[in-house]
Image: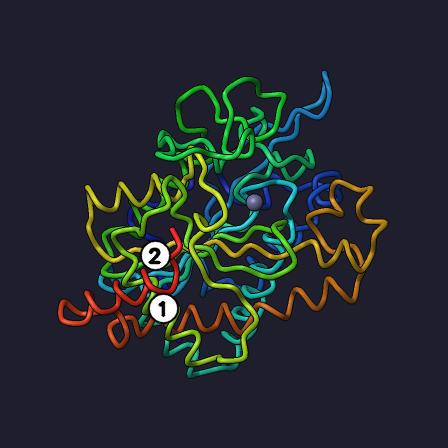
C-alpha cells in the first residue's frame, strides 16, 4: 500500500480540522462531520490540511471559526497528473460538496480492500476541496462572508455583453452576483495558491468544480466565460468530450461551453486559465458540473418556497439518487486523468480536433 508523506511545503499552522469542530458547528454544517469521519477512515493514506480559518459572523456577538480544509492522496511525484474536486464555492449549493464527499467516501472505502485501486494511485494525485466557501454554506448564502460571489470575483472582464446583474455587478455587496472590491477574496486566493503550489507544474491537470441550479439537465460546462470564442485549449476539451461520449454513449449530461448560454465578468476559471497560459503552459482542463436543480423543484414544487430547496434536493430518495448518479462520471474523469497521454491530442491531431470542436459548439456563434 503506497503511503504518502506530507508534501514538503505543507504547514500545519492552522492545526487539525477536528480542532475546530463542536456540536453546534456540526449541526450547522453536517458536511464537516462527513469530512471528519473520512479523515479518520483515511489515516495513513490521505493527508488533510487546514488551509485557512474563516470567520462566520452569525450575530452581533457570535462568530464561528470555520476551517477551509483540503484532502489529498496518491502519488507525490510531480510528474504524476492531478485531479482536483471542488465543491461549495457557492455556499447555497451544498449538494456540490455532498456529491464529491460521496465519491471520496467510495475511494477511502476502496483503499481498504482494492489492490488495483491502490496500485493505480502511483499514477495520479487526488485533491479534494469539498467546502470552498464554508462561511456562505453556514450562512446559507451564495456569496462568501463579505457578500462576494466567488465566481464573479476574478480580475477578468467579459469582452461581450453580460446578462444584467447575473454577469457580475459592483453596485453593492448586499445584492447578488457582487464582484467585490477588485482584489481576489481570501478563498479564491487560497485556491489559486493551492493550484500553483500543488498542481499546475504537473504535466496534466483536471479540475471538476461542482455546482447546482441551472436548468433541468446535468451539464458539464467548459467554464470559459468571458467571451464566446473557443478557448485556446478547446481541442483538449473536445478530445475529453469525445472520449466520454465513446465510453458512455448513453450518458445524460450536456457537455458544452458555458458561453453558449451566457458570459460573465470575473470567472475564477478564466483567471486560472490565464495563469496557466503565462506561467505554466501545461495542459489544464477545468470543468464545472452544473447539476440541474429545476427537476427537483418540478418534482416537489413546495421546494420553490425554500431558498435551499432551489439548489438542493429536499427529498431523501432524490438526494440518494443524486449522490450515486455522478459516481460514474467522477470515476471516468479519474481514469481519463491517469491515462491522459492516451487521448490528449498531439501536435498532429490538434488542428482536426479544434475544427471538430468549433463545428460542434461554436458554429452558430
Ligand atoms: Zn454555483
- Mark 2: which secondary structure? strand
- Where residue 16 appears, x then y in whole percent? 52, 44
Residue at the spot 76% in from the left edge and 53% down from the top edge: 297
| Residue reaching furthest to the front | 364
What colour scheme has been applied to the protein in the rendered image?
rainbow
Give the mark count: 2
Q: Which residue is mark 1?
A: 240
Q: Where is residue 359, by image quadrant?
A: bottom left
Residue depicted at x 56% and y 50%: 211
Q: Residues within 10 Å of mark 1 (few under 14, many from 20)?
A: many
Up-down relation of residue 24 to residue 365 (above or below): above
Q: Which mark is residue 123?
A: none
Mark 2, ligand 1, within 8 Å: the answer is no
Q: Nearer the viewer, residue 15 or 336?
A: 336
Q: Is residue 333 above or below residue 246?
A: above
Residue at image coords 81%, 49%:
303
Earlier residue among tags 2 and 1: 1
Q: What secondary structure is marked by label 1?
A: helix
Q: Contact (CB < 8 A) between labels 2 and 1?
A: yes
* Residue 345 appears left or right of 334: left
Q: Residue at x 78, y 67 (%)?
A: 317
Residue 25 percent coordinates (x, y): 70, 39
- On the image, numbered disc 2 is attached to which residue? 285
Amino acid at each position: 500500500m503506497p503511503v504518502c508523506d506530507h508534501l514538503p511545503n505543507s504547514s500545519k499552522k492552522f492545526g487539525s480540522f477536528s480542532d475546530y469542530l463542536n456540536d453546534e458547528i456540526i449541526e450547522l454544517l453536517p458536511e464537516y462531520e462527513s469530512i471528519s469521519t473520512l479523515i479518520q477512515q483515511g489515516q495513513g493514506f490521505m493527508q488533510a490540511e487546514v488551509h485557512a480559518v474563516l470567520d462566520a459572523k452569525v450575530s452581533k456577538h457570535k462568530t464561528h471559526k470555520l476551517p477551509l480544509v483540503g484532502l489529498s492522496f496518491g502519488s507525490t511525484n510531480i510528474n504524476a497528473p492531478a485531479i482536483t474536486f471542488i465543491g461549495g464555492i457557492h455556499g447555497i449549493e451544498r449538494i456540490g460538496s455532498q456529491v464529491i464527499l460521496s465519491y471520496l467516501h467510495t475511494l477511502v472505502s476502496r483503499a481498504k480492500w482494492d489492490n488495483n485501486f491502490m496500485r493505480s494511485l502511483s499514477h495520479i494525485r487526488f485533491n479534494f476541496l469539498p467546502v470552498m466557501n464554508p462561511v456562505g454554506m453556514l450562512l446559507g448564502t451564495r456569496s462568501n462572508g463579505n457578500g462576494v460571489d466567488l465566481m464573479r470575483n476574478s480580475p477578468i472582464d467579459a469582452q461581450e455583453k453580460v446578462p444584467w446583474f447575473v454577469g457580475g455587478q459592483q453596485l453593492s455587496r448586499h445584492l447578488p452576483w457582487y464582484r467585490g472590491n477588485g482584489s481576489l477574496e481570501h478563498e479564491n486566493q487560497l485556491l489559486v495558491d493551492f493550484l500553483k503550489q500543488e498542481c499546475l507544474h504537473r504535466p496534466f491537470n483536471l479540475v471538476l468544480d461542482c455546482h447546482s441550479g441551472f436548468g433541468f439537465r446535468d451539464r458539464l460546462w467548459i467554464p470559459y466565460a468571458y467571451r464566446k470564442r473557443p478557448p485556446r485549449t478547446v481541442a483538449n476539451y473536445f478530445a475529453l468530450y469525445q472520449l466520454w461520449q465513446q465510453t458512455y454513449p448513453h450518458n445524460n449530461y450536456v457537455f458544452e461551453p458555458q458561453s453558449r448560454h451566457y458570459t460573465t465578468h470575473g470567472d475564477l476559471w478564466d483567471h486560472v486559465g490565464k495563469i496557466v497560459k503565462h506561467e505554466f503552459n501545461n495542459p489544464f482542463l477545468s470543468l464545472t458540473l452544473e447539476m440541474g436543480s429545476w427537476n427537483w423543484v418540478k418534482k416537489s414544487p413546495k421546494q420553490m418556497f425554500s431558498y435551499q430547496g432551489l439548489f438542493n434536493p429536499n427529498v431523501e430518495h432524490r438526494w440518494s439518487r443524486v449522490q450515486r448518479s455522478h459516481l460514474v462520471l467522477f470515476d471516468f474523469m479519474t481514469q481519463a486523468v491517469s491515462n491522459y497521454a492516451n487521448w490528449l491530442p498531439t501536435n498532429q491531431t490538434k488542428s482536426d480536433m479544434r475544427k471538430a470542436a468549433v463545428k460542434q459548439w461554436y458554429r452558430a456563434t
